[in-house]
Amino acid sequence: MEKITKRYGYLLANDRVDLEIFSGEIHAIVGENGAGKSTLMHILCGFIRPTSGRIMLDGEAVSWRSARDATFRGVGMVHQQFMLIPRMTVLENVVLGHELTRGPFLDRRAAERELKALCGQFGFDLEPHCRVEELPMGLRQQLELVRLLYRRSRVLILDEPSAMLAPQESEGLFRVLQRLRDAGHTIIFITHKLGEIFGLGDRITVMRGGRKVGTFVAEDTDASSLAGLVVGRELEDVVSPRTRQPGAVILRIEDLRVEDDTGRAAIQGVSLDVHEGEILGLAGVSGNGQIELVEALAGLRHVTHGRILLDGVETQNQTPRKARDRGLAYIPEDGPGVGMVEDFTLGFNLVLTRHWHPPFSSHCLLNLRAITRHAYSFIQEFDIRPSDPEFPGRALSGGNKQRLVIARELGQPHRLLVAMHPTRGLDVRAARTVHRALFEKRNQGKAILLVSADLSELLSLSDRIAVLYRGKLQGIMESCEATMAKLGRWMLGLTA
């Protein structure tokens, strides 16, 4: 890619970026949210057309009119939010748009043979006739890769490939990527997890402010120096000594039972407490009831049995607004997707769920001046880019959308914060800002239920850690007694 520039009005997303990728390598792209990583990769795979610059593939200049052109030439992308149709089978998702036919009919046998051959060659564990909605996140990630291989893609671009995976699933993905590289494929992946680069990536390109800082051989650098290059300065470790001991119970869950969207039991008899001045971490492989539990707490899912008490008052099966009025703040799993209104400005999004309260409204009219002042303070604190309260939410990068949701929820009065994967998709500096804010809330006496697939994050932030497996509570342990190995065993249903 030579001198790639992309403008959105006055916003310069990519500024004359040069990028060189070798055949048969794993190349990591790192940088802060809004650094231009995803924009550059969307240009490479044909989703976005550059303002200027050119792409050379095997020494030949190419110009994509659409992503289909790029796919035809062997360049494909796995997005952070999977592009799968849940109700369709694995085989149907793989062949969709590239069907093998016998006359006017789909040749299912030939397609299935090719799918099984790809799975056998690269170690994918996919059943062709299984519905996608029944697959865990790790297998959905594999399915996205198989779709690209079925389309004969030689350049595979992955956006935050481990963001939605448990540690065991991430390890399996990395083994697959190494096998693909050894078979001659070129892997480009965007990541904020600097630790996973080493031992996987061959070379690393750092981007900052829409420009390329440099490209480095992975063996010649380390996570600390890389973090400094990403943010442009040395980062301080987040250290927050406890200023108070856990106090009274803020959240009490008693024998809770909740069903998923298909009517199956997703939460089965879970009971636990969260105290004021405590961070309780909740671990579990994706799909083991975490979403259903959190949505029940937020008033978004019906409770079939049991009680939820917030400061001693029952809140199960109440509206989300009543739950918030009782002191709940909620960071959803898909913050950018369901935690904001993309057609609203940054300012309006930052007062959602509080816009009916003073000083943001009076006599049924919004106070635009108060909303703008409020927005400026949180935009600055959480480094939301661009820093214009009138900027539309739709035009933000994924990481900046997540920052916006986090800023709003942490900034409103609350007794209990339910945070689900709050740092997923955030760069290293933004993640540390969130960690620091969580410690501050804990030390102020707030109760925090932290759901995360990142075990290192849970171990560093939590006072206690609970583990869910198939909708049941495997156990709760003090963080000082927890290890990666022990948590991993509990997450897989193996207990003493």
Image (spheres, rainbow, N blue to C red):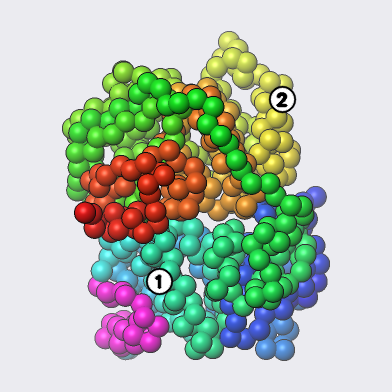
- First in residue order: circle 1 vs circle 2: 1
Distance from the alpha carbon under mark 1 to that under mark 2: 47 Å
Mark 1 neighbour class, 10 Å CA radius: few under 14, some 14 to 19, many 20 or more: some
Residue 172 is labelled as 1
Q: Is residue 420 left or right of residue 355?
A: left
Q: Quadrant of the N terminus?
A: bottom right
Horizontal side of 129 relative to 16 (left or right) equals left
**Where is residue 243 drawn, in percent x and y?**
54, 27
Q: Which secondary structure, mark 1?
A: helix
Image coordinates for residue 7, horizontal then vertical, percent: 77, 58
The residue beneath circle 2 is: 373
Q: Position of residue 264 (x, y in %)?
A: 19, 48
Which residue does the image show at 38% across and 87% down from the upper left? 121
Residue 212 falls in which quadrant of the image?
A: bottom right
On whether residue 106 falls in the magenta region, the answer is yes
Residue 367's place in the image compared with 479, above or below, is above
Amino acid type of the residue tagged 1 in the rendering: Gly
Q: Is residue 349 left or right of residue 227?
A: left
Residue type, numbered disc 2: Arg
Q: Which mark is residue 219?
A: none
Front residue of 73 and 217: 217
Residue displayed at 39% across by 54% down = 483
Magenta residues, as a range? 105-129
User: Can residue 260 be seen in this snapshot?
Assistant: no
Is residue 149 shown left or right of residue 214?
left
Give residue 207's position: percent from left, percent from top. 72, 62
